[in-house]
Image (cartoon, helix red, strand yellow):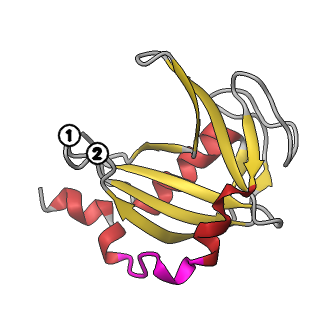
Amino acid sequence: MEPGAAAVVLNERAEVLLLWRHRFITNTWAYEIPTGQINLGEESAAAAAREFEEETGWRCGTLQPLVYLQPSNGLMTSEHYVFLGEGASLIGPAAEGSSPRALSGYRYGGFHRWSPSVEYWVAHRSRRCSTHSHLDHSSAAESR
């Protein structure tokens, strides 16, 4: 499985933008952070910014490494590079799904919501991955 990149992006009230998505394979709905595949040769931060913009219609101002994880380590190889972003601005409709109405808005289906659920992560920023060396997908791809 190709590595993925995700963006946990905060607004000025320390709320995070979440997506409400239906997954057909499991026939379930769930909140998700914008996530997607890192293209060959693409840096993980660039992929996180691209996926965030495509899926939400918002552009992130800054991105910092938050955590590297393998959420299904016992089942499959699935690397995820998660970034913390701030300073988002609405640039237009989402390329994938519907666009958000407002920072606190709801939309059924392509639902986007700014949620305060990331407060714990923000309060513990010092515990996140602090080096970019683990987050450089392009160099990892070259070593394969």
Is 26 on the left-hand or right-hand side of 112?
Answer: left
Which image quadrant for residue 99? top right
Can residue 62 be seen in this snapshot? no
Quarter of the rendering occupied by the C terminus? bottom left
Q: Residue at x 49, y 15 (%)?
A: 27
Can residue 23 be seen in this snapshot? yes
Q: Position of residue 110 (x, y in %)?
A: 69, 27
Which image quadrant for residue 105? top right
Residue behind mark 1: 75
Q: Which label number is shown at residue 72?
A: 2
**Residue nearest the viewer, comparing 75 with 40:** 75
Q: Position of residue 84 (x, y in %)?
A: 58, 66
Residue type indicated by callout 2: Ser
Quarter of the rendering occupied by the N terminus? top left
Q: Residue at x 60, y 28 (%)?
A: 21
Asked if marks 2 and 1 touch (Cβ < 8 Å), the reply is yes
Cα distance between the residues tagged 2 and 1? 5 Å
Q: Residue at x 62, y 38 (%)?
A: 55
Q: What segment is highlighted magenta in the picture?
A: 124-132
Is 30 on the left-hand or right-hand side of 102?
Answer: left
In the rendered view, tell whether residue 85 sits above or below residue 41.
Answer: below
Is 15 on the left-hand or right-hand side of 129?
Answer: right
Q: Residue at x 36, y 45 (%)?
A: 39
